[in-house]
Image (cartoon, rainbow, N blue to C red):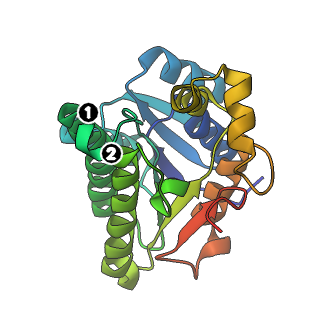
Amino acid sequence: MGRLRDKVAVISGGAGSIGAATARLFVAEGARVVITDIDEPGLQAVAAELGDAAAAHPADVTDSAQVGAAVDLAVERFGGLDIAFANAGMFGSIALVAEYPEDVFDRVMAVNVGGTFRLARHALAAMRDGGSLILNSSVVGLTSDPGICAYATSKHAVVGLMRTAAKEVAARGIRVNSLHPGPVDNAFQHGIEVTATGEDEAGAAAIFEQMIPLGRHAQPHEIAAAALFLASDESRFLTGAAVPVDGGMSI
């Protein structure tokens, strides 16, 4: 208990497995959190589990006013802001670049890039000096594969945003880093794998695990643990870093 004592955090995508696991871990380490998501029932369930240390704020990350209101809630309810974890995202479709649906591409960019930017913009304006901004990218923000142009493009763009912001706020002691998870054992990833391979969930997972040097999917709490390190003072001399948590996929 205590690595985030007296810290206040905002987490987008808080109803998903990584966002919820991170909120749980942050609260366990002494933080108070505002979690946002478009999945209001899921969001409320996570907030109810966390009790008085958490507040839920339904928000679509493509809407700047809604994102800004979540940041305002953190400041008003808990007295400030020290940590922001831009975690909301979507995958899109699988298709070759020459055949990729433009509307899907635009939506992926709006959520993954625009949504990350909006939380970064509002959070950095409100964040206390010495804080931490964490942007959730992906292993395909460091690599890529055929058929995933929208997702990979968006996740590479997050790295550019991270590096720019890291230089802009370094004088305030604020650190900005990106996380790059590999395949995680959750519904989001399993849906991608089934679509990509045409196999059932177990068969698709086995195919993907052959591509991971450590030979397994990550658990959501393992990604949350990396976010905790980046949020805590243990990483106070780490900024502008793209941190892979991918079982070796980006080697």
- The location of residue 32, given as percent across then percent down, is 56, 44
Secondary structure of the residue carrying numbered label 2: helix
Residue 125 image point, x, y percent: 27, 62
Please name the residue shown 45% across and 29% down the image: 56
- Mark 1: which secondary structure? helix
Q: Are marks 1 and 2 in contact (CB under 8 Å)?
A: yes
Q: Give the residue type at disc 2.
A: Ala
Q: Residues within 10 Å of mark 1 (few under 14, many from 20)?
A: some
Q: Earlier in the sequence, mark 1 or mark 2?
A: 1
Circle 1: residue type: Val
Mark seen at residue 104: 1
Does residue 215 appear to the left or right of 248 in the view shown? Answer: right
Per the rendering, the mark at residue 150 is: 2
Q: Is residue 61 visible?
A: yes
Q: Is residue 6 above or below residue 27?
A: below
Residue 130 rendering spot, x and y as whole percentages: 48, 73
Within 10 angstroms of label 2, few (less than 14), some, or many (20 or more) residues? many
Q: Is residue 240 above or below residue 5?
A: below
Where the C terminus falls, by quadrant?
bottom right
Q: Residue at x 78, y 52 (%)?
A: 1
Q: Is residue 7 visible?
A: no
Residue located 66% across and 63% down the image: 229
**Relative side of 95 to 99, left or right:** right
Place residue 174 in its image quadrant.
bottom left
